Image: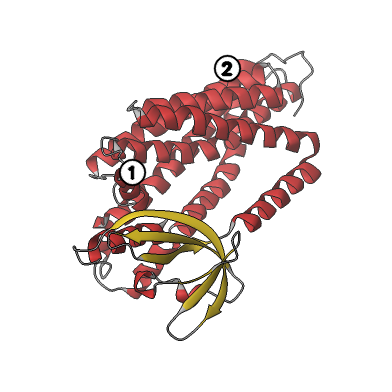
Amino acid sequence: MKKLLLIIIFTFVLLPSAVFATGETQFKARIDNIGDDFIRVENLDTKKKYTIDESFEVGMRQQLNIGDKVLVNEITMQDGVKRYVITDMIRGPWIYVLIFIFMLTVALIGGKQGVRSLFNLFLTLTIILFVVIPLVLKGWNPILVVVGGGSLAMLFNIYITYGINKKSHGTLISIIASLFLAALMSAFFVRFASLTGFVQEEASFIITLGYSDLDMRGILLAAIIVGTLGVIDDLAISQISLVRELSKANKKMTKLELFQSAFRVGRDHTSSMVNTLVLAYTGAAFPLMILFSIGNPPFDSLASILNNEAVATEIVRTLVGSICLLFTMPIAAWVGAWLFHNKVDKKTEKG
């Protein structure tokens, strides 16, 4: 996406104002030859060969080898001249291979539960792509849409996987409560840390597509909430299951005793999960970490690092997710204690 943005800038801003593109088409091609001052490609469909205009190239040359498959834009200028620009590599086939390996691994190792999880994943992505995002694009409040959509996705996922029983009810209640906490904390810190949501390059690209009225700060909040949702569901179901088993093992335990026992066990789980979450966000922001180590402005002091919006955004995203993850444990433990104290669900439950 970054290359596409830069190509747009080079095409419409950096070229002389007397020459502008009047239209463009895209085709798939194979690198046919690479010379000192030229790159030649062959159209995969027509087998015609074209020379790439290197004045438009944006850092692609060093990545290319003969035989590589790429996407090429044919740009027709106002003077009728056609120019050809490599916009990106063709990665689709290998991504499909990786997706297949992932699905096969989940199915083989997870068995029936793994197949259910794949179905739940598909359902969650469907809700995000065809419910949440369209509503956000129509101008709905991103926070309300994500909380509502996330709750709906979890409702289907939990009841499909674990059935309709107390364990499922408790898990859903815990997740929704944690989602609202994530929404409140995100809104507070994004507002008072003056995060705009424009620091990510995708935000600029969305605006260039004509969605200038979108609430980018709200979309940033929604992204933080979605990221949090991805970690709290596992902890919630683990805590609810733990309380249920404790109640089965000792039916004389009171609400408080169930909560305290689950809380003690949950501490070990949350400490490892917080570390996992922080490392996941650190990995996503690894280029920023490299900039810190280089130490050049605007990353030459701790104050300037923390004041940078890109850094502040990742810090808020990571810490809000971690705090909500930590609170999910006692919330789920309390909900489980309330549901299972001195009672055992008589229905046959899986998991």
Q: Residue furthest bottom?
A: 36
Q: Amino acid at mark 1?
A: Leu
Q: Nearer the viewer, residue 182 or 44?
A: 44
Q: Is residue 308 left or right of residue 93?
A: left
The residue drawn where x is 59% and y is 61% is: 46
Q: Amino acid at mark 2?
A: Trp
Q: Is residue 256 in view from this perspective?
A: no
Label 2 – label 1 distance at C-alpha: 50 Å
Residue labelled with disc 1: 209
248 shown above or below 79: above
123 shown above or below 167: below
The colour mode here is: secondary structure
**Which mark, residue 286?**
none
179 shown above or below 3: above
171 shown above or below 267: above
Q: Nearer the viewer, residue 109 or 319?
A: 109
The residue drawn where x is 24% and y is 45% is: 193
Q: Nearer the viewer, residue 319 or 131?
A: 131
Secondary structure, mark 1, is: loop
Q: Is residue 214 left or right of residue 3?
A: left
**Residue 316 placement (x, y as % from top left):** 35, 46
**Residue 112 placement (x, y as % from top left):** 79, 34
**Residue 90 placement (x, y as % from top left):** 56, 60
Q: Quadrant of residue 194?
A: top left
**Front: mark 2 or 1:** 1
Q: Quadrant of the C terminus?
A: top right
Q: Nearer the viewer, residue 96 or 240?
A: 96
Q: Is residue 287 in view from this perspective?
A: yes
Q: Earlier in the sequence, mark 2 or mark 1?
A: 1
**Residue 240 placement (x, y as % from top left):** 63, 27
